Amino acid sequence: MSGLPNYSSNINVEKKITPYIGYKVTKDAFMGNDKDNKKVEFKFDLDTKIAFDLNNIKSGFQWFKGDNSPPEKKMDAWVNGACTPAQQPSAMMDANGELKPWRRFAEIPCFNSILGTRLFNFDGVATYKSAQRIVAQWLENRSNQSDTVFLFKYEGIKLEVSERDKTRNLSIPNFVFLKEMTRPEGFEVLGTEQNASQSQSSDIPF
């Protein structure tokens, strides 16, 4: 009688790296990763245009243990533009033995000709406010079509006094809605396979 077979895995399979970008307040810069998953800076000029796939937004709470392990997440439920927020979990003990709370985050797929397709992470107090304003403009202007994306223009960093700490200013990336549009060629649907022939439009005006 033969024993249990060995665990089968192909060590030559390359792990897929998800391209990301986010605004880092401490560096006053938009940071992301390159093809080797190393951190790099991306230049955002005033009037930089970027398309957001808001029909595929994800948000919720995340918690970092502090030992370089991936965050634990509790996700909101999004249905047709309506968000049912997740209940905030209780704080947990991190790798240093300290209680660390769960914090709000949002992730929105984005695209322009320089960035390509990336996941825009809004995971700080200031950047989360930026995501809230992007979503508000989306809800105000959307046509309820599921296959469109939304073009925004970057208008710099807006300083606002923190609601929690009146002695502190928040640096909030300011994106202003321009138009709803068909998905440009090259704007991949993250998490699925998509050929260029499946794209809705070859016109990339940004």
Image (cartoon, rainbow, N blue to C red):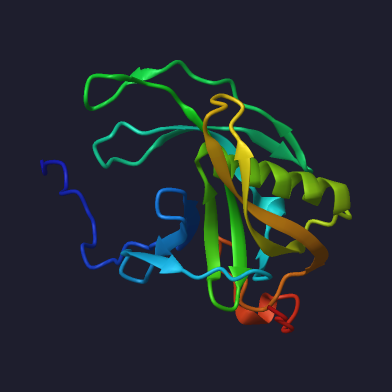
Give the residue displayed 60% in from the left and 44% down from the top. 58
Give the residue displayed 26% in from the left and 42% down from the top. 68
Please tell me which residue lies in front, 169 or 15.
169
Q: Is residue 66 visible?
A: yes
Q: Position of residue 1 (x, y in %)?
A: 10, 41
Q: Position of residue 51 (x, y in %)?
A: 68, 65
Looking at the image, residue 37 sits to the left or right of residue 78; the answer is left
User: Does residue 106 lie above or below 11 as drawn?
Assistant: above
Looking at the image, residue 110 sits to the left or right of residue 65; the answer is right
Q: Position of residue 14 (x, y in %)?
A: 30, 67
Looking at the image, residue 72 sits to the left or right of residue 66; the answer is right
User: Does residue 21 lie above or below 95 as drawn?
Assistant: below
Give the residue displayed 72% in from the left and 45% down from the top. 133
Residue 37 sits in quarter = bottom left
The mark total stands at 0
Please tell me which residue lies in front, 19 or 22.
22
User: Does residue 134 lie above or below 79 as drawn?
Assistant: below
Give the residue displayed 64% in from the left and 71% down from the top. 48
Residue 41 sits in quarter = bottom left
Q: Is residue 188 visible?
A: no
The C terminus, quarter of image? bottom right
